[in-house]
Image (cartoon, rainbow, N blue to C red):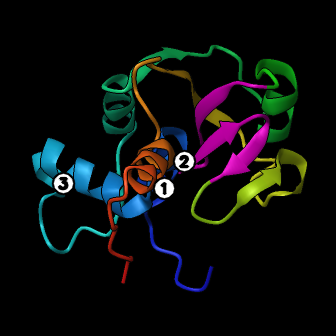
Amino acid sequence: MNNIKPNCGPASVSHLLGESVAITMDRFRSQFKRYAGARWKGYSYVADCVSLLKMHGKIEEVTGRGSLKSFVENHTTATGEYLIRVGGHFIAIKDRKVFDNWFDGADAAECKWSRKRVTHAYKFERKESEPSFAELIERSRRAGLKLREAA
């Protein structure tokens, strides 16, 4: 990625929700007054990320800590989804892979935060009735709706 913005919170939440970062940032803007300004580039708080995820499923705090690498090895499941904060940076863990505004499915041992300490960890379980963004797009295409391309 060439133009990395300080939007790791919305980027990580978007990976967990299965939607684009732009849509998630719009969710932050509409849900929380502090993000409504035009100057907001994506910096977010733990409580706000957790609050947005709660709207779409069950989220519970994970008590284990340690480095990102050891946390993924010892406290995650092979098919689980997690919101993690390390050194002031948000990361989504899906199937023991790292997703954020830098990495798109990297091994925890290979990413630049592998030795950083996990300060916050939450396990996310999507509501069964909550379709992902990709599923909504596929349903729309099957129904014959034309979708406009992102600029």
Assign the N terminus to one quadrant of the image. bottom right
Q: Could you say where residue 121 lies in the image, as x and y percent from the top left?
A: 59, 27
The span from disc 2 to disc 3 (Cα, nearest Å) is: 18 Å
- What amino acid is labelled 1 in the image? Ala
The reply to whether discs 2 and 3 touch (Cβ–Cβ < 8 Å) is: no
The picture quadrant where one finds residue 103 is bottom right
104 to the left or right of 151: right
3 to the left or right of 94: left
Label 3 crowd bin: few (<14), some (14–19), many (20+), radius 10 Å: some
In the rendered image, residue 55 lying in the magenta stretch gets the answer: no
Element class at badge 3: helix
The span from disc 2 to disc 1 (Cα, nearest Å) is: 6 Å
The span from disc 3 to disc 1 (Cα, nearest Å) is: 14 Å
142 to the left or right of 71: left
Element class at badge 1: helix
Q: Which is more toward the observer, 129 or 67?
A: 129
Q: Which residue was labeled with disc 1?
A: 11
Q: Residue at x 63, y 13 (%)?
A: 63
Element class at badge 2: helix
Disc number placed over residue 15 in the picture, else none = 2
Q: Which is more toward the observer, 137 or 63?
A: 137
Magenta residues, as a range? 79-99
What secondary structure prevails in the magenta region?
Answer: strand
The reply to whether discs 2 and 1 touch (Cβ–Cβ < 8 Å) is: yes
Q: Residue at x 60, y 46 (%)?
A: 91
Q: Is residue 111 above or below residue 28?
A: below
Q: Could you say where residue 38 lies in the image, as x and y percent from the top left?
A: 15, 73
Disc number placed over residue 29 in the picture, else none = 3
The reply to whether discs 3 and 1 touch (Cβ–Cβ < 8 Å) is: no
Q: Is residue 33 above or below residue 150?
A: above
Q: Could you say where residue 93 lies in the image, as x and y percent from the top left?
A: 68, 38
- Residue mark closest to the camera, 2 vs 3: 2
